[in-house]
Structure formats: structure tokens, C-alpha cells
Image: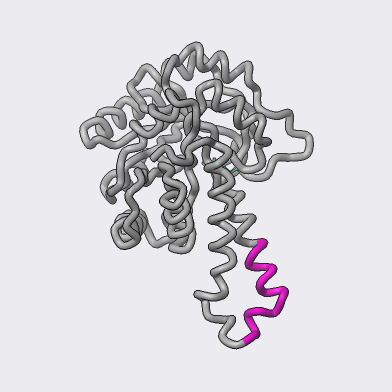
Amino acid sequence: MLVSAKEMLEKARAGKYAVGQFNINNLEWTKSILLTAQELNSPVILGVSEGAGKYMTGFKTVAAMVSAMIDELNITIPVALHLDHGTYEGCYKCIKAGFSSIMFDGSHYPIEENIAKTKELVETCNKLGLSLEVGSIGGEEDGVVGMGECADPKECKAIADLGIDFLAAGIGNIHGKYPANWQGLNFEVLENVKKEVGDMPLVLHGGTGIPADMIKKAISLGVAKINVNTECQLSFAAATREYIEAGKDLQGKGFDPRKLLAPGAEAIKATVKEKMELFGSVGKA
Ligand code: 13P
């Protein structure tokens, strides 16, 4: 059964570990992440961007696939199905489709409008028992572009006070691969945000390529959810490339999609395992 991410993230913040949000793109992705989380007895959040939702033919398909898979694979760990960087309209589509958690990214609206829309979503999500994340961060993901800006702690407080469940504050993190001249996470900003918002679980987007020591420090300062997308894509692509370059698709029935996609699916499992171990969520289901 799908659950809201509120309780798992409050537990993570109190226990000083983080739950991974792993973005999904298709059936193989979803299956690899769910099986790894179950094997490691870790809570997990499946992230769906609006682009990935469209690719999978719509949010209704995604919700139906994830719910059925949890059932058929006998998944018993807590799983949240979460809209990643949702537009206002996208949030309502996912609520209707049966998602258990929503991120509203209203960062392109003027702050007053962002606040008004957030307030309305808080009410709707509370009524339905869904968790709500609000915020924005830099980099590009499915057309959502930012530059690694740092959040204004006072604005974070204004948003946190609206009754949201967890907050994504930019601290120099960026979606996708980090550029060679990246300055690293800004822990001073993170500490100031934490001072303003207190015990609210914080979310670190752009989890791909952040060094382990920075991840651990961020968790110690209140980060309870870390989003990973690109890293699974890179490991899937590398394993698939290796299979094809070794000519394995040309041997016997190596072209069978179940064989062709298997090394990539295994590579996703290995990446998810590595991240769950680093984030400290193993055994916390
Ligand atoms: P990466 O693609 O950099 O791992 O970021 C994922 C993310 O933050 C999803 O919202």
C-alpha cells in the first residue's frame, strides 16, 4: 500500500538518516527500486517528474502500475509515490490519480501567489492524508531550470509556516551532473534555514554526484530526504552500453528485451543499494 511520506521523513529526521527519493521512468526502474528497498528493509519514495509521467502515458498509469507492483511483488516496506517538481495543475492531476505525496514547485510565481497556491494545496493534501513538499532548486530536470541558487531562510520560514510537511531549500545543489567548478553545498545557508524552520524535515535535491561527506553533514543538519535521478540513468546506460558493445544482443536470444534490459535493471539496483547505505535508511522500514 502506498503511504504518505510524512511519517517516514519525521522518523528519519529524528533518527538522523535520510530516505531516498528515486525517480522512475518505466517498469524496470520501478521494479528495481522496489525490490532493492524491500531487500534492504528501507522505506522509499518513488519520484515522478511531469515529463516522466507523460512518458509513461499519464499519472493514472503510473499510480496503477506502482500500486499493482507493490501488491504482486509482496512489498511490505513503506512506499510513497511522489510528484517531483509539480506544477499547480500537475499536483491536482496526481492527487486525482492516487499519488500519496506531492511536491509543488511554485518558484516561478511571485512569492504571494506561490504562498496562496501552497495554502490551498496544504488544505487539500491534509484532507486527503497526502504529504506535501514545497520548494525549488537549481539545475535542469525535465525542463525545470535553476542555477544552484541558495534559498532565503526567511522565505523558507514563510512557506514552512503554511503547514507543509517538508521543505526543499536550495543550498547550492543542482540537478544533473555537477560542473567541475562547483563550489559544494552551502552549509551556512542550510544551518540558517534550519534555525528558521526548526524540526521540519528538509529535502536535498540533486543527489547525483554529491560527495559522501557532504551528504552525511547535510543529514546531520536536518536533511531527511535526498533525491536521486541522474545517477540511476547513468548506471542503467553504462550497463546497457557494455552489454551491446560486448555483442551480447547478437548472441542467441540476447535481443529479447527481458535480456537486453536486465543488466541496466541490475545496475539500478546496485546504485539504489549504495545510496540507501550512504543515507542510513537500511533496516529502518
Ligand atoms: P539528480 O538528477 O541530480 O540526481 O536530481 C534528482 C532530483 O533532485 C529530483 O528532483
Looking at the picture, how far across and down is residue 244, in whole percent? 67, 74
Which residues lie in the magenta part? 238-251
Q: Can the viewer see residue 38 in this picture?
A: yes
Task: Kindly identify the residue that appears in the image at 28 percent across and 49 percent down.
Answer: 1
Looking at the picture, how far across and down is residue 219, in whole percent? 54, 27
- Ligand 1 visible in quadrant: top right
195, above or below 17, in the image = above
Task: Kindly identify the residue that appears in the image at 56 percent across and 33 percent down.
Answer: 137
Query: Magenta span has 36?
Result: no
The kind of secondary structure the magenta stretch mainly shows is: helix
Q: Quarter-wise, where is residue 132 in the image?
A: top left
Foreground pick, 99 / 283:
283
Horizontal side of 224 relative to 187 (left or right) equals left
Looking at the picture, how far across and down is residue 183, in whole percent? 73, 28
Q: Residue furthest left?
A: 127
Q: Can the viewer see residue 92 in this picture?
A: no
